[in-house]
Image (spheres, grey):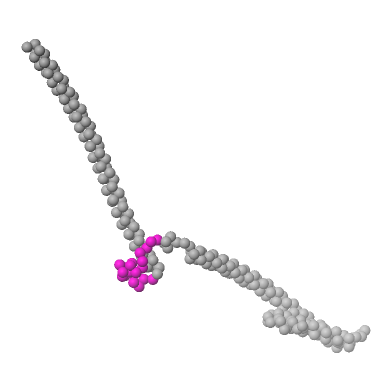
Amino acid sequence: MDANQFITDPSLQAVLEAAEAARAQSMQMLDWLDRNRCDNPSTEARLELSAQQKLLNTRIAKLRGLNRSAIFDTRATKQQTAEAKQEIDTLHLQLQNLYYEQRHLRGEIVGCEGYDHKYQSLPLIPVEVFLAANPDYQNADEHNLMIARINHEHAERQALEEQRQQLLKKKQSLIAENNKKKDELAALDKEVEKFLNGGAAVQKRFEQHDVKAAAAAAAAAVAA
């Protein structure tokens, strides 16, 4: 598989090109040595070999430089990749938290929608009656209309509670007045009883006097 098919970075492509050039130069030198193998090479052969050796060293030096640059670029890319990955992980965690919060809020909404609110069982007056008495709410939405009906019910109950408190106070006042009259009647009964008892004693004395008077008259009549 050709590496150039999946390596697109310019710096890495330059390294591959330099490596290929150094390889080709090495193969060329090996071919030259095979063709010019001898125990005592000529001056021209030595100069040619030296020139090829210098060219190979130049290509290798260039390859090393490009390789070093590629390594530094790779390290920088790895650092950037790590930073980008950390940022992505942070964003992913935030997204997960938002997802969990969204799911929790949806559950709360479903719970609130299915909650058996007390206001639903309040004995509110019919909507038609309320709108007839309060025409300002003819165009109100369902939410504001319900709030207005609840406030109306609250006001009505407050008024009834005030009436109940007033009637309770009046009842207590009447009870206190009745108790006072009962006490007065009880005292009057005692006075009447005392008066009656006193009248009976007087009557008894009168009767005793009459008996004595009758006895004296009878005695006087006998003596005569």
Tell me what residue is drawn at x 89 percent, y 86 percent: 34
Q: Position of residue 35 (x, y in %)?
A: 89, 88
Residue 97 found in image quarter? bottom right
Place of residue 83 in the rendered image (x, y in percent of width and height, measured from the top left): 62, 70
Region in magenta: 122-141
Looking at the image, residue 115 sits to the left or right of residue 131; the answer is right
Q: Is residue 209 left or right of residue 100?
A: left
On the question of residue 59 being in view, the answer is: no
Quadrant of the rendered image containing residue 36 = bottom right
Between 167 and 64, the residue placed more toward the observer is 167
Q: Is residue 122 left or right of residue 20?
A: left
131 falls in the magenta region: yes
Residue at 52%, 67% in the rendered image: 106
Residue 17's place in the image compared with 206, above or below, is below
How many marks on residues? 0
Q: In the picture provided, is 139 more to the left or to the right than 70?
A: left
Closer to the camera in the image, 2 or 162: 162
The answer to whether residue 9 is above or below residue 186 is below
Q: Please name the residue shown 34% across and 57% down the image.
A: 157
Q: Position of residue 1 (x, y in %)?
A: 77, 83
Return the x and y of residue 222 as percentages of the image width and height: 10, 12
Residue nearer the viewer, 209 or 95: 209
